[in-house]
Image (cartoon, grey):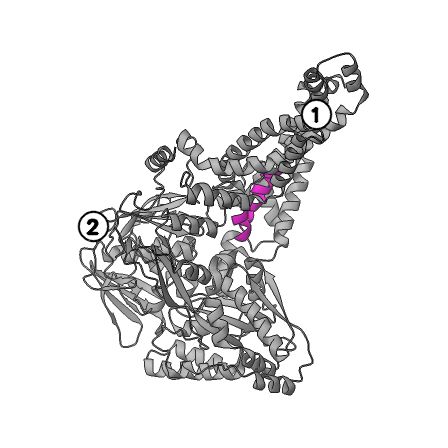
Amino acid sequence: MPTLLIVAVSVFVLIRLIPGDPAQLMLGDLATPASLADLRGRLGLDQSLPVQFGIWFGKVLSGDFGQSIASQQAVLPLILQRFSISAQVVLVAVLLASLVAVPAGVIAAWKQNSSLDLSLVTLATLLLSIPTFWLGLLFLLFFGLKLEWLPVVGYVSISENVEAGLLYLLMPIMTLFLHEIGVILRMARASTLEVLRLDYITHARAKGLSEMAVLWRHAFKNAFGPTWTLIGLVLGNLLGGIAVVETVFTIPGLGRLLVDSIFARDYPVIQGCLLFVACTYVLVNLVIDLCYPLFDPRVTAA
Amino acid sequence: MRKTLLVLATAVTGFGFAAGQATATTLRVYLDADIRSTDPGVNRDGNTDGVVLHMVEGLVGYDARGVPKPLLAENIAVSPDGLTYTFKLRADVKFHNGATLTADDVVWSWNRYLNPKTGWRCLTDFNGDVGLKVESVTAVDPLTVTIRINEPSPLFLANIARSDCGMTAITHRSSVKPDGSWDKPIGTGPFKLAEWRRREFVSLARFDDYSNPDSEPDGYVGSKRPLVDEVRFVVISDPATAKAAFIRGDIDILPRLPYSEADELKPNPNITISAQPGLAATTFLLQTRDKLLSNVKLRQAIAAAIDYDELVGSVTYDLATSNSSLVPVASLFHTNVHQNGFRHDPALAKKLLQEAGYKGQTLKITTNKRNQANFDAAIILQAMLEAVGIKAEVEVLEWGVQTDRWQSGKYQIMSFSYSSRMDPALNYEGAVGPKDSQPRKVWEDKMALDALAEVTGEARNEERQKLFDRLHAAMIDQVPLIPLFSTVTAGASRKNVKGFVSNVFGAPLLWEVRKD
């Protein structure tokens, strides 16, 4: 609750520190002082900030995030709808990236300084360095325009049609997938390298265990902890919005909602989105922490 | 693989992959942002107006040159005292629900607009807050309506036809829910609402019973036949993606595109570019209350430092010509007088700088990147000022922040575009006014204030022309702002789209447009 209050106050104050008036942006340069005053009154923007905050936060506590200034829609259902779209892309991309990057990172560490290791590290650094918008545009140009395999514009919900939905999500998922491979692979490699240098690994080898047994049964379990934490951070970060990818591929997700709302100074939506993102981040990391005992017995013992 | 994907997506989603494979009579039009609502003139922006005005119509609308003419009205009579307007309605005009338009519908619509609870954007222009007040709207007979106002207003018809007022559209009462809140537009326009999927698309279906005026197409009036089964406005936030979709044929029309894109797409044989000078003005605003710029000699020096043909040609890729007047090139009032404007004269600029006592202080040019023309103009201005010895730096702001600065008058030079206004008096009204009460105004000269008040109440065109000429001459002399060009709307359509042309309104007009 105190965390929620701090986040709520910060979000409320910070967004109002940005110059710009929602009423002015809605009415444009054709607005008259009278029409501006009229609209501000109807939006409740003519009241003092503490009063505005009190009304908004009181509603939030009862589960009502208010109404969008721009679209007049209820904010919470709007956020949940957009979040479900972003989550589809993020969860699939991070899952696939983890499945590829973690084994690749472990193998790279195992074969440290070999040509395979160098190739994997170079690839990971390259993928990490490419901005997602640029990678997305390359996909659009190649698979969308040149080969004409995949749709350039539009979105279909997976709940409406699984196959078509996947078709539309393929390029955004691939974009995030490739980018996150770079992030996760480097962490998996670094943490595995660290563990492989420890005495108990030498001891395991001295016992005559096979390299596979040393690597997966002894090294991997200890090395996976930091990588798992990183995956949690990546997931929490991406679930908070993938505005760039959503903009490039015209996906109506949470990130685009937030960015559009900032440009329109749609205060209720911005506040709702940021509060929701903060809660999601905390929740994801809580789940990540709770999963530790599954692969690290020391956590259970502690 | 490719064939499977194409068939699957085309069949299931309605988004065709290649030109010719989409449904033959669906016209796909690019929107850079979603519409705000379907309620005319209430929760709106430019995109909203552009979409909604395909579904609804008002008593009057603008013709292709921006002159208000009867639309749902057959004719309009004004009483000798200028206070009573009598609108004779066209017979047998149908709403989208099949009901016939009557005078009662007009009264109901106007009463709704004039009710503060509706939140009509133009309420204060008609409720007496700024002078004009609609005192009554009365149904005389089923096809006759009278509107009585409190004072003569030559701009009354021009104001009710404004797109930002939703053309004061006449809608059927079933457009609202039982509790009085807005549901969907049941209008008389050539298209009706089929589906609005927020942040994805707005789909309009052809209205088969549209009552088409028997005349040539002429802006918002004249023939407005719906020639395609569906118009689908597709929301695409990223311009690069929109361009890619257009080139591939997933989008049929880009109604507005940056000048650089128009130039780039021009050689493409599958694409037609259409450009039309509009009614908006791209300008530099000079803050006359600034310590430095309060010196008229310095403002005149800045005006003389600009090579207008070079700047406008570069910014618009030669799509526009320079226009130093606030009267748009497309206006009936843009006479030879208004072609005499600021002149590029570096020697004069240097002389004026000396007379102004300029000592090398840095001037700040405020601009934004949302409007590429504003940004490009600011960069070029900086270089031109430097060329005559004026130090200048460019400050790039997010659009909302720049709007805030404009509203509060906190800038020195601002690269700024005014929205389309249908009457030149409204263009001057945007700039002229007292800065104490309205800091966004840029020109507070007494002569200008008086002339503006006079032209706003003047109905005779000859007298109005004289007043516009006087305002223009004074503006050139005092330099409170520097109009650069009447903003050109450049649009692009695929070759299989016939009848699409850009217009002075800067909005897509998709009636009389077909797709082969």
Q: CA distance from mark 2 to mark 1?
A: 75 Å
Q: Secondary structure at mark 2?
A: loop
Q: Quadrant of residue B318?
A: bottom left
What mark, if any, has residue A110 been given in the picture? Answer: 1
Percent coordinates x, y for residue A300 in the rendering: 72, 18
| Residue B36 makes an appearance in the image | no
| Residue A31 makes an appearance in the image | yes
Q: Secondary structure at mark 1?
A: helix
Residue type at mark 1?
A: Trp
Q: Which residues are magenta?
A: A259-278
Q: Quadrant of the N terminus of chain B?
A: top left
Cβ–Cβ below 8 Å for labels 2 and 1?
no
Count residues near mark 2 (Cα–Cα under 10 Å), then give few for <14, some for 14-19, many for 20+: some
Percent coordinates x, y for residue A141 in the rendering: 46, 45
Q: Main secondary structure of the magenta part?
A: helix
Furthest toward the front, the residue is A115
Percent coordinates x, y for residue B226 in the rendering: 25, 53
- Residue that carries the numbered disc 2 in the rendered image: B209
